[in-house]
């Protein structure tokens, strides 16, 4: 076996396999992230509805957090604070969109395709919390799209927010939407998923 000649096309084939593995890993990370974002949004919607209809208060939320942490000890996202963030996400983005105007209207005004729900589903949870708690509603879509396009970490998003305030109307002037490389997308989500899914 040691003396067996390596075929001439072996290195090209190996690079192709590596690329496909990286691409599959990136797609898997994005799919897991999207599922978690939808789950957290639906939990937030449930909490919001029960607070509105049944008068749930902070004690019920704290109890739910304790019960969920006991049931899923390897996941870090089920604290009382994070359940409140889920509720905030559901309240401020009822259809998982960062902009409240209809997508067609925003597209017409900005001449930029709107990513809305897609943008929310592609962002790690902590990015969404940052947008909900630090960015103005009119800025959120701009930052969401740019965070995805640039593969921004949460720290980069926070720095950019402090130095580059934007609104939805600024999208057409500044956005050249290019999907980041598979490696960049995976890196942007991987750290957040580790703690959320695996408790690391």
Image (tube, rainbow, N blue to C red):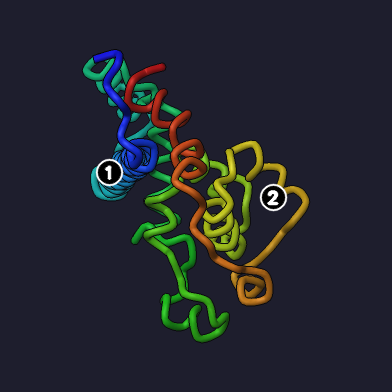
* Residue highlighted by disc 1: 35
* Residue 105 spot, x, y in % from top left: 46, 83
Q: Is 169 left, or right, of 114 in this rendering?
A: right
Residue sitting at x 49%, y 36%:
187
Q: Position of residue 67 (x, y in %)?
A: 25, 19
Using the image, determine if residue 149 lies above or below residue 186. Answer: below
Residue reaching furthest to the bottom: 108
Quadrant containing the N terminus in the rendered view: top left
Q: Earlier in the sequence, mark 2 or mark 1?
A: 1
Residue at (59, 65) in percent of width and height:
138
**Residue 11 spot, x, y in % from top left:** 39, 37
Label of residue 161 in the image:
2
Q: Which one is nearer the viewer's eye here, 146 or 138?
A: 146
Q: Tag on residue 169?
A: none
Mark 1 neighbour class, 10 Å CA radius: few under 14, some 14 to 19, many 20 or more: some
Is residue 40 shown left or right of residue 195? left
Residue placed most toward the observer, 51 or 117:
117
């Amino acid at each position: 076996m040691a003396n067996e000649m390596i075929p001439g096309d072996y290195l090209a084939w190996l690079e192709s396999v590596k690329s496909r593995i990286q691409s599959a890993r990136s797609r898997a990370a994005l799919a897991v992230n999207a599922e978690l974002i939808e789950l957290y949004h639906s939990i937030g919607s449930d909490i919001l509805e029960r607070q509105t209809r049944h008068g749930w208060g902070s004690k019920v939320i704290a109890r739910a957090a304790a019960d969920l942490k006991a049931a899923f000890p390897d996941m870090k996202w089920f604290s009382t604070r994070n359940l409140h963030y889920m509720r905030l996400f559901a309240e401020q983005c009822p259809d998982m969109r960062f902009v409240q105007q209809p997508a067609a209207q925003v597209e017409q005004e900005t001449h930029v395709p709107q990513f809305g729900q897609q943008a929310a589903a592609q962002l790690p949870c902590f990015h969404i919390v940052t947008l909900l708690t630090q960015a103005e509603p009119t800025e959120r879509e701009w930052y969401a799209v740019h965070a995805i396009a640039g593969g921004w970490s949460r720290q980069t998003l926070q720095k950019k927010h402090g130095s580059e305030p934007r609104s939805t109307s600024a999208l057409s002037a500044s956005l050249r939407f290019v999907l980041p490389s598979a490696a960049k997308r995976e890196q942007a989500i991987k750290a957040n998923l580790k703690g959320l899914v695996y408790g690391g």
